[in-house]
Image: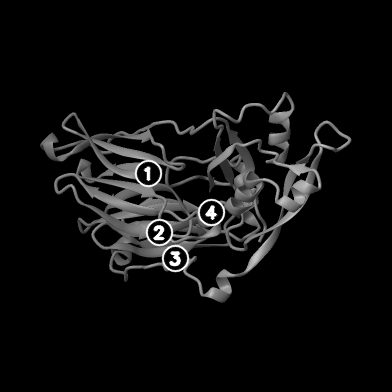
């Protein structure tokens, strides 16, 4: 499968998660004691996501962690938020959706998918029911995915490689694209995330489909099995990768040498980085190779919308690496 170009962002010294402030998307119509008026996702000590706080009547209530994004719906009665415990997928990027009811203070999981969640919008149908339309994307191909969620039951409708082009009452129009189209679409969008359910593109779709939300809400609940729940034979399959160690005896100032490692075939990104940060084996050290990460600790790595974010920290006793250390470290990554 053709993969998008992955941009590598190195975040030095600790975590770099900016707080996210949400706002009510619909006007409140009743007592603020049972309505959420805003939310905040505060940075946490976790390597991914943050901690969700919901403000009710001026008081902040801690809800859940880790959380990537949140949406206030149903006139502030409910808050939807995405988290990391999806159903696996490419590099374990799958995310989940949960719904928090402000009055009962109960939280339920209503979606578990194989891709990341980009946007959620609540739509009240002509019969008075609420449907959640969800836009998702993967970190490899950069393709889009679509789902409908019944907030009372869970995910009830799903389409692969599809984007919303119009919403007219109960009807949602989907456009489907070929595998080769996604590079063109993402090039047009500069490989950047965009807000909203509908994102225009000049690329012509392969086909379209109209989805009646009233009908979709009657569908059977979709329960996705985690892609990492594999048999022993499948789980044992690995792939060869290369990491780069520092050769202090090399002729160049920055002399890196590729050495082989074997990692999980389905999700190679994190274990490859773990191997890099683990440094040289005894046999490699005997040949003059040493760590190219100079005692740095891998905190975490996430892959979303074609962007790989590596988070690492520097222990206080690991600072004597010389002026070439940062350059060696950067090239090794």
Q: Earlier in the sequence, mark 2 or mark 1?
A: 1
Q: The C terminus appears in which quarter of the rendering?
A: top right
> Which residue has dot 3 on it?
226
Q: Is residue 51 above or below residue 274?
A: above
Give the number of the disc on residue 147. Answer: 2
Q: Distance between the Cα atoms at labels 2 and 3?
A: 18 Å
Q: Residue at x 62, y 48 (%)?
A: 273
Q: Earlier in the sequence, mark 2 or mark 3?
A: 2
Q: Tell whether 147 sits left or right of 304.
A: left
Q: Secondary structure at mark 1?
A: strand
Q: Distance between the Cα atoms at labels 4 and 3?
A: 16 Å
> Which residue has dot 4 on it?
138
Q: Earlier in the sequence, mark 1 or mark 4?
A: 1
Measured as percent of width and height from the top left, residue 172 is found at 39, 56
Query: In the picture, residue 327 is in which quadrant?
Result: top right
Q: State the count of labels.
A: 4
Q: From where the camera sits, is residue 203 visible?
A: no
């Amino acid at each position: 499968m053709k993969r998008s170009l992955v941009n590598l962002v190195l975040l030095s010294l600790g975590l770099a998660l900016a707080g996210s402030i949400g706002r009510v998307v619909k006007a409140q119509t009743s007592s603020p004691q049972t309505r959420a008026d805003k939310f905040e996702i505060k940075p946490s000590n976790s390597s991914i996501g943050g901690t969700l706080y919901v403000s009710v009547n001026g008081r902040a209530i801690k809800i859940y962690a880790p959380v990537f994004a949140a949406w206030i719906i149903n006139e502030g009665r409910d808050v939807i938020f995405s988290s990391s415990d999806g159903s696996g997928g490419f590099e374990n990027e799958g995310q989940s959706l949960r719904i928090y009811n402000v009055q009962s203070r109960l939280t339920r999981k209503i979606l578990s998918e194989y891709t990341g969640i980009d946007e959620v919008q609540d739509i009240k149908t002509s019969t008075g029911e609420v449907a959640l339309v969800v836009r998702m994307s993967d970190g490899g191909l950069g393709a889009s995915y679509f789902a409908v969620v019944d907030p009372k039951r869970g995910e009830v409708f799903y389409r692969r490689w599809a984007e919303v082009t119009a919403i007219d009452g109960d009807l949602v129009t989907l456009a489907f694209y070929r595998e080769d189209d996604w590079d063109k679409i993402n090039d047009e969008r500069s490989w950047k995330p965009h807000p909203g359910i509908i994102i225009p593109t000049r690329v012509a779709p392969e086909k379209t489909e109209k989805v009646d939300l009233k009908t979709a809400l009657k569908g059977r609940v979709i329960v996705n099995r985690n892609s990492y729940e594999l048999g022993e034979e499948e789980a044992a399959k690995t792939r060869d990768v290369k990491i780069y160690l520092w050769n202090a005896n090399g002729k160049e100032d920055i002399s890196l040498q590729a050495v082989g490692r074997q990692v999980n075939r389905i999700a190679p990104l994190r274990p490859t980085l773990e191997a890099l940060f683990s440094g040289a084996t005894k046999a490699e050290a005997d040949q003059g190779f040493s760590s190219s990460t100079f005692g740095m600790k891998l905190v975490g790595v996430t892959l979303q919308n074609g962007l790989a974010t590596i988070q690492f920290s520097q222990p206080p006793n690991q600072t004597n690496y010389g002026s070439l250390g940062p350059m060696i470290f950067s090239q090794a990554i």
